[in-house]
Amino acid sequence: MSRSAQLRVSRTKDVPIPNAYIAALLGEFSPWSYDEERAPAFRGAWRENAFGVAPDVPLDLEIGTGNGLHFASRSAEFPARCLLGIELKYKPLIQSIRRALQSGHRNARIARYNAYLLPELFTAGELNDVFIFFPDPWEKSRNHKHRLIQDLFLARLYEMQRPGARLFFKTDSRNYFNWSLERFKRSAYKLDGHTFDLHQSEFVSGNFITQFERIFMEQGVPIGYTCLSKN
């Protein structure tokens, strides 16, 4: 079995008893949300076919939207930019797009897809800024192979972004942050800045505090943060 096949998720249409969130994905929110079968059809033409905008309009990506607080805030703060989120779980997927739409803007879309398979969704130079906040740290050594931040992943993502685009990364796991920082430094990206404790650094100004982030802050857990860019 190929690596791509191993990363496949169950198809939404094959869920025997769809819950309310699946029904919303396929029904009420279908103009703005796409299941794992619809999403790849936009590859290479997300701006024109999903958002109905010109090819030069910025298209940003949030990988793993969670409950959508940052996703909705970002779409509201930057209405002239398109924002696409990808999320696997149905409940946060619907929460995210619902929050974004409640802001009154229509510049947000969301797709159910596996982040390891981004090349199936985007062509070279299709993306602008990318946000990866609090991905699964896979703490045990035997599970490090499952971590999203890998050399190959970064090489592919770099190719999919446009010159001048940025990559933002946050995690509460010091082990994962160290792991990621090593890979960031040897990637093609320019490391614009990083800190092991975001909320005690110069980067805290303008930082949006996600739900996970607030929980960690209350527990006294420092947040690792990195900002990178493509030349």
Image (tube, grey):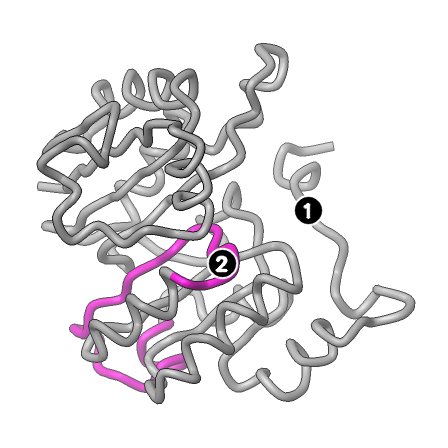
- The three-letter amino acid code for the residue at tag 1 is Arg
Crowding around mark 1 (Cα neighbors within 10 Å: few <14, some 14 to 19, many 20+) is few
Quarter placement of the N terminus:
top right
Looking at the rendering, which quadrant does residue 229 occupy? top left
Q: CA distance from mark 2 to mark 1?
A: 14 Å
Q: Considering the numbered disc 2 on the image, is that residue within a helix, a strand or a loop?
A: strand
Q: Which secondary structure lies at badge 1?
A: loop
Left or right: 67 as drawn, with respect to 175: right
Q: Which mark is residue 86?
A: 2
As drawn, which residue projects farthest toward the right? 16
- Looking at the rendered structure, the kind of residue marked 2 is Ile
Mark 2: few, some, or many residues within 10 Å (few <14, many ≥20)?
many
| Residue sitting at x 32%, y 49% | 131
Residue 78 lies left or right of residue 31; in this view the side is left
Given residues 142 and 20, the one toward you in this image is 20
**In the picture, which quadrant includes the C terminus?**
top left
Look at the image and give the residue range highlighted in magenta. Answer: 46-69
Report the number of numbered marks: 2
- Does the segment drawn in magenta span residue 56? yes
Q: Which of the two marks, 2 or 1, is nearer to us in this view?
A: 2
Q: Is residue 215 magenta?
A: no
Given residues 44 and 175, the one toward you in this image is: 175
**Location of residue 126 with respect to 73 vertically, above or below:** above
Q: Which mark is residue 163?
A: none
Tell me where residue 168 appears, x and y as whole percent: 26, 43
- Picture coordinates of residue 103, whole percent (x, y): 36, 83
Q: Which residue is mark 1?
A: 8
Residue drawn at x 51%, y 78% as measured from the top left: 98
